[in-house]
Amino acid sequence: QVQLVESGGGLVQAGGSLRLSCAASGGSLSGYVIGWFRQAPGKEREFVVTFNWSIASTRYAESVKGRFTISRDNAKNTVYLQMNSLKPEDTAIYYCAARRIGISEYNYWGQGTQVTVSS
């Protein structure tokens, strides 16, 4: 069973950058789609980006295109989310999740990491 642990959140000023990590254990991420999601206070969880590990394809939410970049380290079985030009509206708890390719539901979730962007 895949286990996911996020790290890298924190407090940053608007315009700054953070890099989040999602480290997987319990199995290779090959054959999985990795997603980053976020949930701001009082709002529903929203999709940020998905990454198909097998074919290295990505899909970004419009709100983060051009500012966020997802990448991976195969050897470390880790996915990174580089977040640049951060805005106060990016403030949220960020979660990484995994689902097997061909399965629609994300079955594996990390505990989340808080990102706070001050204006």
Image (cartoon, grey):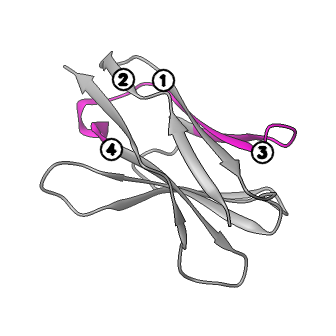
Image point 84% across, 62% down: which residue?
55
Q: Amino acid at mark 2?
A: Gly
Image point 40% across, 16% down: which residue?
16
Q: Amino acid at mark 1?
A: Leu
Q: Is residue 118 magenta?
A: no
Work out how far the residue at label 2 is from the one at label 4, CA to CA, in angstroms. Answer: 10 Å
**Mark 3 or mark 2: which comes first in sequence?**
2
Q: Is residue 83 magenta?
A: yes
Q: Which residue is mark 2?
A: 10
Q: Is residue 21 visible?
A: yes
Q: Is residue 104 above or below residue 67?
A: below
Work out how far the residue at label 3 is from the one at label 2, CA to CA, in angstroms. Answer: 23 Å
Q: Amino acid at mark 4?
A: Ile
- In front of the other: label 3 or label 1? 3
Q: Is residue 60 visible?
A: no
Residue 2 at x, y = what percent? 67, 61
**Mark 1 or mark 4: which comes first in sequence?**
1
Q: Which residue is mark 3?
A: 77
Q: Which residue is mark 1?
A: 18
- Residue 35, which numbered label? none
Q: Amino acid at mark 3?
A: Asn
**Mark 3 or mark 1: which comes first in sequence?**
1
Determine whether the residue tagged by mark 1 lies in a helix, strand or loop: strand
Work out how far the residue at label 3 is from the one at label 4, CA to CA, in angstroms. Answer: 22 Å
Q: In this view, which residue lies farthest toward the left?
A: 42
Q: Which residue is mark 4?
A: 93
